């Protein structure tokens, strides 16, 4: 296979399975895997990655769909392990290319996704609800679903059987032994699969560097109780809009302290409505109030559950911190709880929000100063436990940055998995499973697909580089009118800047240098506007670099009179 080819080529061996990750290996997001057997493709998850500061103007980042764009007719199903955005957020964009791909997932996962499909005007998409313990046949694949505990209800691992072997994909999971909903990770099913013989174990890596076991969810409840007991004003709790368990804990604490609860943020209102309708969220009567009625209650009687725990600029919490929210005005003495993890890359945005809230007089409680969040992912001790139970022939760490994948691989090796059967792959690497051995056999292109408003995939790295330069260094425009026949400058050069200097008078020193360079080029017979623009760009760029140690974008325009 040619290295870096665009499309996943058909698997030629009838006795092999092929696995290609189109996202999620190297990032905490845009999770998507392709499993191929006998000409058919089964997809596992299809999520988004949220942009960082070096992605100006980008709204979402999708998996590398291009690798399967010419083989969409071979796709026989999309298995969704759970309802987090980094696992389902890209589904509508995939369905734009082929809207009849069957979706397979738990009841809550498909219900959360249904809201997104309506927003994208995707109707009549085939769906199949499954639950733990179910075994279904999807084309030439048999899929078995296993209950796993995570920070959202109804999460599933999936075992995929074919004549070429057995793959187990954990999805995101942990081993909370006292979960709030009583639904623990089914270790007996993992052990049974291990006895059957797992040929490839694809394992969540997010917390592989964290020693021991992840703290149980229920340990957060006392911290929330203390916050509400100590506060004499409003309490705002920001968390992920899909974290049903966390919201349930906030609701229970609010009821215990005779407070009303209001949901703020479109995704929070939507998701909690779905969770309540399906019975995953229990809201006592007369507890929930509408946002418009919030001022009808004393501050000490209200708890606000909001989006924005990652510092998203347009989220409810960010707007509150900047006094831009249309309804909620933060008062000095209010308490804000950030009940979520800090996703890598969001640190600056989150700290900006914390500083804004503190500046307004709020008391901010977060993971750094109180136990108000625990991870939804298995730590090293739990991963070791799973490896010892399953005893897989091959391991492929998934879902995490490179350091997480490597740490997870080291854990597998420590339990006896041979190093040459521990696959540390990158997005796009093609892994073939044949005869019980997994091997990297090539690579396809699985780069970022950027979403900018309604534009998908037309944003190049060059465009992002230009945006970064504009944002960090500013730009300078230069306009000159020349008469190439008379070899003289008729007007200009007029120089203006944005994001570089406040006073255009700073260019008085460089203007004569540009004039001299242009006149010299005209005298030498240069009569092409593009070449004259390059003369301006070189002269001005050299002066800016030497004088100001900056590299702004320079936009020269030469008009021929």
Image (cartoon, rainbow, N blue to C red):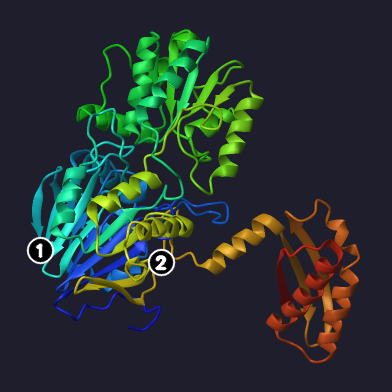
Establish if 8 lies above or below 24. below
Observer-side mark, 1 or 2, equals 2
Q: Mark 1 vs mark 2: which is more N-terminal?
A: 1
Give 363 or 63, whichever is nearer the viewer: 363
Q: Position of residue 292 (x, y in %)?
A: 42, 19
Q: Is residue 216 visible?
A: yes
Q: Nearer the viewer, residue 55 or 457?
A: 55
Crowd tier of the residue under label 1, counting other residues whose Cα lies within 10 Å: few below 14, some 14–19, many 20 or above: few
Q: Mark number for residue 351?
A: none
x 26%, y 31%: residue = 275
Element at label 1: loop
Residue placed under numbered mark 2 in the picture: 426
Residue annotated with mark 1 = 139
Quadrant in the rendering for residue 509: bottom right
Q: Position of residue 372 (x, y in %)?
A: 46, 28
Quarter location, residue 492: bottom right
Residue nearest the viewer, comparing 119 with 468: 468
Q: Nearer the viewer, residue 155 or 182?
A: 182
In the rendered structure, the answer to whether residue 390 lies left or right of residue 262 reads left
Q: Is residue 185 above or below residue 330?
A: below
Query: Is 355 placed left or right of 77 in the picture?
Result: right
For the question of whether residue 378 can be seen, the reply is: no
Tell me residue 49's x, y (percent): 42, 53
Residue at (20%, 70%) from the top-left corner?
Answer: 436
Residue 70 picture location, percent across and down: 26, 73
The image quadrant where one finds the N terminus is: bottom left
Disc 1 from disc 2: Cα separation: 28 Å
């Amino acid at each position: 296979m040619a290295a870096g080819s665009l499309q996943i080529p058909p698997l030629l061996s009838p006795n092999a399975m092929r696995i290609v990750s189109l996202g999620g290996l190297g990032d905490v997001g845009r999770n998507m895997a392709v499993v191929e057997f006998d000409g058919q493709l089964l997809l596992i998850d299809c999520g988004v990655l949220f942009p960082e500061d070096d992605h100006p103007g980008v709204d979402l980042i999708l998996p590398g769909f291009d690798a399967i764009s010419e083989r969409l007719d071979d796709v026989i199903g999309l298995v969704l392990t759970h309802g987090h955005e980094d696992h389902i957020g890209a589904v509508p964009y995939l369905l734009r290319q082929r809207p009849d791909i069957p979706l397979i997932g738990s009841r809550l996962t498909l219900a959360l996704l249904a809201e997104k499909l309506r927003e994208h005007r995707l109707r009549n998409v085939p769906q199949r609800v499954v639950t733990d313990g179910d075994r279904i046949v999807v084309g030439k694949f048999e899929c078995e679903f296993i209950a796993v505990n995570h920070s959202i209800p109804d999460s599933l691992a999936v075992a995929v059987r074919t004549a070429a072997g057995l793959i187990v994909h954990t999805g995101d999971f942990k081993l909370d032994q006292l979960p709030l909903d009583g639904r623990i990770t089914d270790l007996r099913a993992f052990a049974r699969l291990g006895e059957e013989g797992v040929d490839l174990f694809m394992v969540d890596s997010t917390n592989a560097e964290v020693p021991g076991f992840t703290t149980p969810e229920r340990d957060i409840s006392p911290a929330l109780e203390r916050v509400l007991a100590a506060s004499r004003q409003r309490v705002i709790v920001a968390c992920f809009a899909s974290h049903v368990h966390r919201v349930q804990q906030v609701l229970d604490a609010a009821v215990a302290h005779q407070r009303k609860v209001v949901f703020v943020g479109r995704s929070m209102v939507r998701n909690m409505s779905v969770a309540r309708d399906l019975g995953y969220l229990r809201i006592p009567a007369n507890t929930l109030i509408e946002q418009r009625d919030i001022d009808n209650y004393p501050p000490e009687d209200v708890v606000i559950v909001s989006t924005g725990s990652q510092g998203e600029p347009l989220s409810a919490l960010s707007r509150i911190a900047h006094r831009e929210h249309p309804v909620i005005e933060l008062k000095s003495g209010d308490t804000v709880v950030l009940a979520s993890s800090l996703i890598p890359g969001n640190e600056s945005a989150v700290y900006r929000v914390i500083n804004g809230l503190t500046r307004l007089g709020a008391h901010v409680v977060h993971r750094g100063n109180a136990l108000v969040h625990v991870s939804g992912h298995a730590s090293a001790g739990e991963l070791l436990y799973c490896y010892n139970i399953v005893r897989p022939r091959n391991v492929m760490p998934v879902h995490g940055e490179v350091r997480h994948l490597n740490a997870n691989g080291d854990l597998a090796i420590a339990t006896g998995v041979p190093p040459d059967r521990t696959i540390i792959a990158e997005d796009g690497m093609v892994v073939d499973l044949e005869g019980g051995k997994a091997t990297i056999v090539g690579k396809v292109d699985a780069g970022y697909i950027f979403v900018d408003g309604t534009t998908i995939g037309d944003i190049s790295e060059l465009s992002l580089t230009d945006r970064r330069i504009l944002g960090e260094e500013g730009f300078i425009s230069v306009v000159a009118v020349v008469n190439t026949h008379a070899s003289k400058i008729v007007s200009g050069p007029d120089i203006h800047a944005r994001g570089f200097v406040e006073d255009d008078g700073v260019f008085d020193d460089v203007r004569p240098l540009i004039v001299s360079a242009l006149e010299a080029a005209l005298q030498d017979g240069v009569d092409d506007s593009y070449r004259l623009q390059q003369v301006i760009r070189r002269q001005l760029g050299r002066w800016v670099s030497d004088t100001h140690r900056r590299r702004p974008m320079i936009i020269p325009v030469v008009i021929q009179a």
